Image (cartoon, grey):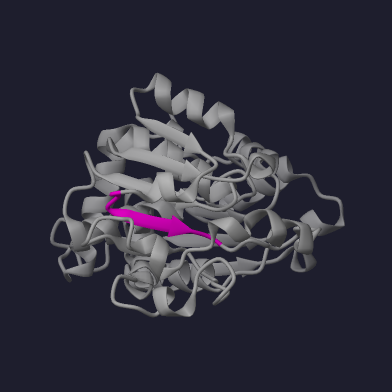
Amino acid sequence: MKKTPRHFLELTEVASGELRRIVDMAASFKRGERLNGDARPLDGRALAMIFEKPSTRTRVSFEVAMKQLGGTVVVMTPNEMQIGRGETIADTARVLSRYVDAIMMRTTENDKLAELASYAEVPVINGLTDHSHPCQLMADIMTFEEHRGDISGKRIAWCGDGNNMARTWIEAAARFDFEMRLACPPELAPPQDAIDWAVGEGATIVSTTDADEAVDGVDCVVTDTWVSMGDTEAEKRHNLLSPYKIDQRLMDRAAKDAIFMHCLPAHRDEEVTADVLDGPQSVIWDEAENRLHAQKGILAWCLS
């Protein structure tokens, strides 16, 4: 009887204890520790990576992570696959499952990822969709805890667009037991279904249109680019989001030892001023590095 694949698609679908295990494994890998005494726990394993959206951090971190754990990687784009010429996602999943041990997909439509996972016989990993970005959150939790200890009971503020990253932070609040505050314009409000789910799981979620209110006394301030790949009406979005720019005045409202996080790429002096992004409270380069270690934790968990 075939083993049911252990997918990593949404934080809502993985229990808190398992997510904690992934973060702990990531931290262990970063310290140079071996998994069960094995320096190459994924020796002989292969990962297929499907990119329908361009990537820097996701591609490099997954490829290096897989190779450092002993595995190999195949990178594909729609132009290089039959999926871009009419082959169904279901058939692609069935075929790839005969060749590789796991599939990572970075796409726009969450339905594509869900269909891939429903037909794959190997683990499928969400490398980003317009709906969520759980791999990034594993690195973010790891980064916060490196600098400020256990995230449980802490207060995190999100300022800006209520996008896929905002959704994933909301879900993480329920899974890792911290308070999540979000300041977004009404036109770009965070997804209500995610808030309802998190509150139902016992999380404290505060949604406001006032950035000062959201940031007051928090342990970490987070933002994201205002215009992502595929977004239209850039000027309109900038006008809506300009009151949510992270500057030093806003950071000064947070706790004295608060940190600043951004998943990158960043646009200096748009969503965040250069003095904050490059300043002493910013941990963005640790956050970027931790994508590598978090991917190792995710891969080891999926393939264990």
**80 or 194, which is in the foreground?**
194
Q: Determine the residue positioned at 41% across, 19% down.
A: 200
Q: Return the residue nearer the eye: 225 or 31.
A: 225
The correct choice, above or below, for 26 with respect to 75 in the image is: above
| Residue shown at the point (29%, 76%) measured from the top left | 280
Q: Is residue 122 visible?
A: no
* Horizontal and vertical percent position of residue 291: 39, 65
Q: Splitting the image into 4 quarters, where does residue 179 fall?
A: top left
Q: From the viewer's perspective, is residue 240 above or below residue 275?
A: above
Residue 174 sits inside the magenta stretch: no
Q: Tell me the magenta residue range.
A: 217-224
89 or 260: nearer the viewer? 260
Estimate the x, y position of residue 78 in percent, counting from the top left.
76, 62
17 or 286, which lies in front?
Answer: 286
For residue 296, what is the image quadrant?
Answer: bottom left
Asked if the magenta segment contains residue 221, the reply would be: yes
View extreme (top): residue: 200
